[in-house]
């Protein structure tokens, strides 16, 4: 008998989940979190936003 999607007891999960700006992130991460393609212009804008707002820059996109 096949396992149902609910039978995932053997699936490993991280012991701790992270959201938002709890962990280090790069300007590229910020661009991807915004749902856009990475371009040099967007990476530069993300760098400026990170310098200006810190972790709040990524928390805007992630819970």
Image: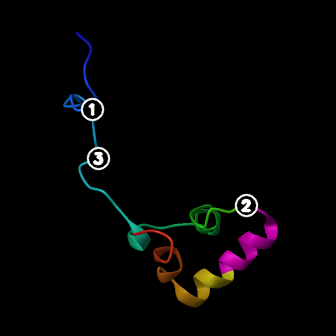
Question: In the rendered image, which quarter is residue 47 located in?
Answer: bottom right
Q: Is mark 2 on a helix, strand or loop?
A: loop
Dot 2 or dot 3: first in sequence order is: 3
Q: Mark 3 points at which residue?
A: 14
Residue 31, image x, y percentages: 64, 66
Is residue 26 shown in magenta? no
**Residue 20 rendering spot, x and y as whole percentages:** 42, 70
**Mark 2 = which residue?**
38
Q: Is 47 situated left or right of 1 in this image?
A: right
| Residue 22 image-quadrant placement | bottom left
Magenta-drawn stretch, dominant element (helix, strand or loop): helix
Q: Nearer the viewer, residue 50 or 6?
A: 6
Whether residue 58 is situated above or below residue 19 in the rendered picture: below
Dot 3 falls on a residue whose secondary structure is: loop
The mark total stands at: 3
Pointer 1: what residue?
11
Q: Residue at x 27, y 14 (%)?
A: 2
Q: Which disc number belongs to residue 27? A: none
C-alpha separation, residue under disc 2 versus residue under disc 3? 28 Å
> Farthest top residue?
1
Residue for point 80% across, 72% down? 41
Badge 1: how crowded within 10 Å, few (<14), some, or many (20+)? Answer: few
In terms of secondary structure, where does tag 1 sit?
A: loop
Quarter the C terminus occupies: bottom left
Start-end of magenta stretch: 39-47
Badge 2 crowding class, 10 Å Cα cut-off, few under 14, some 14 to 19, many 20 or more, is some
- Mark 1–mark 2 distance (CA, rounded to whole Å): 32 Å
| Residue 54, image x, y percentages | 51, 83
- Badge 3: few (under 14), some or many (20 or more) residues near its Cα, within 10 Å? few
């Amino acid at each position: 008998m096949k396992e149902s999607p609910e039978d995932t007891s053997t699936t490993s999960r991280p012991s701790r989940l992270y959201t938002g700006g709890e962990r280090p992130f790069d300007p590229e991460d910020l661009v991807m979190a915004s749902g856009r393609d990475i371009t040099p212009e967007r990476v530069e804008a993300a760098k400026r936003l990170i310098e200006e707002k810190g972790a709040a820059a990524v928390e805007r996109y992630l819970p």
